Amino acid sequence: MNQSARTRMVWSCALLAAALGTATACDSGNPLSAEPYDAARQIAFNGVQDGKADPGKPLEITSNGSGGRITDVTAVDESGRYIAGRLSGDGRQWHSTGPLAAGARYTVRVSTENDDGEPGRKVLTVGTGDPAQKTALKVAFGPKAGEYGVGQPVVAKLSAPIKDRAARIAVERGLKVDAQPAVEGSWYWVDEKTLHYRPREFWPAHATIRVSSGLKGIRIDDKLWGGASRPLKITTGDRIEAITNASTHRMVVYRNGQDIKDMPVTTGKPGFETRNGVKVVLEKQAFVQMRSATVGIAAGSGDSYDLPVHWATRVTWSGEYVHAAPWSVGSQGSANVSHGCTGMSTEDAEWFFNTVHEGDLVRVVGSDGQNMDPFGNGYGDWNLDWAKWRQGSALLGDGSADPGQQKIVESARLRPEV
C-alpha cells in the first residue's frame, strides 16, 4: 500500500468513526495508528562510539538492510541549537550539513518506517568531546546596551583574525541578529577581526534588536573553536535625521519624516570642506576645547585656533562636529567659513544637542568636499549601496573588504581629515 492510499484510509476511518461515535475495524489494520517500533536494529550511527562523536566530522545515520527507510531526523543540543542535515531521496542515509559543537550533548530523534509502512523511532543521546588543540574565538558586540538612533550599526569584534572564507562563513552563520519589526540585513567584514551589521534600509523607529552568538563549541578552523559570548539588546527611538545643504547653508531636522526645525549653518571653507554623505552621531560633549595644533596646524598661522566650544555633537573620529559657533553667526545661512564642522548659533546648537542621540543620522549634501568613508572614521556604513554591502558578507558575497575602506583615522578635535 503506498503512502497516498494509507492517508486516504486514515481519513476514511476517522470520518466513519466520527459518524458512528465508535471505533471501527479500520483502526487495527492501519499501520499509522500503531505505536512506533524500536528502530535500533534498522539504523546505524556511523562514527559514534560509546555515545561520543567527533565534533570535527559530520554525524551520519544509515538505514540497515534492504527494507524500510529513514523518514526524519532531528538533532538538538541542550542549548536548543539544531543541526542542519540532509536526507537522501531513498531514505537510506542522513548526514549533518551544519557543524557539531565541541563539548556538547545532542538528542537525536530518528523516525523510520518498514516495508509495511509501520512507523519506527529511535532516540539517542550523542556527546561530543573537546578537540585536542583548542583556542576559543570570543565575540564582543557593540554598542553597549541602550537606546540608539535608527542609523546605529551593530559591531562584532573578534578575539582572533579570520582570513579564510570558509572560516568566515562559519563565523557569520553563528552570529544572530533578530529585529522586531523584522528587517532584511547582513554582516560586512570590515577587516579580519571586525564585522558590522546593518539593515538594507535604516532600522525601523522603536525597534528591538537582539544580537547573540551561537558559536560556542563550533569549529572555525583546525585550531580555532567558538567560545562563549555575551548577547546584546539595543532599541531604537524616533527616526531623527538632520540634512545639511552646504550650498544653501541650511540644516533641516526631521523626526519620523516630519521637519521639526530649519536652521542657518556654516560648513567647511575651501581647503577644509565638510564631507558629503551619511554620518551617524558618535557622541555628545557639552564642552570641548578645540585646538588646531592637534591636527597639525601651526600656532600663529592664519588657520590656527584655540576655541572653547559648547554643545558639540560628534559625527567623525577625525573631528567633524555639529556645534555652537557664535563667532560665525554673521556667515551662518550665507557662507561657509568653518574648518570642516557644521557651525550654528549657540541656541540652535543646544537644541540640536538635546534633540539627537547616538546613532541618529546626519547627512551632508552640496559640499565640494570628499565623500564620507564607509569605515574607519565613524559609521559611514550607509554610504555603501545594498549590493556593495552584501559583497562584504562571506555568505552573500565573497566576504572580502576593500583595504582602502579600512584606513584607521586618528582622532582630531575639529578639522576633518582632507
Image: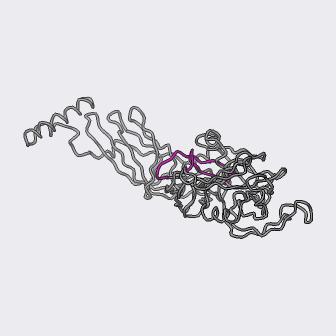
Q: Main secondary structure of the magenta part?
A: strand
Visible residue check, residue 286: yes
- Residue 81 at x, y = what percent? 45, 53
Q: Which residue range is magenta in the image?
A: 178-202
Q: Looking at the image, which residue is at 61% across and 54% down?
A: 253
Residue 399 place in picture, x, y as percent: 64, 43
Residue 328, how many percent across, how many down?
Answer: 78, 60
Residue 322 is left or right of residue 117, and the answer is right
Counting labels gives: 0
Colour mapping? one colour
Q: Quadrant of the N terminus?
A: top left
Q: Which is more toward the observer, 168 or 407?
A: 407
User: Visible in this render: residue 50?
Assistant: no
> Residue drawn at (54%, 58%), measured in percent from left and top?
130
Q: Position of residue 142 (x, y in %)?
A: 60, 60
Q: Residue 418 or 240: which is nearer the viewer?
A: 240
Name the residue: 70% across, 55% down.
264
In the image, is 123 to the left or to the right of 192? left
- Which residue is situated farthest in the right direction here? 300
Residue 108 is one of the magenta-drawn residues: no
Between 211 and 257, which is closer to the camera in this rendering?
A: 257
Q: Quadrant of residue 300?
A: bottom right
Image quadrant where residue 326 sits: bottom right
Is residue 192 magenta-colored?
A: yes
Vertical position of residue 256 compared to residue 411: above or below: above
Judged left or right of residue 306, residue 22 is left
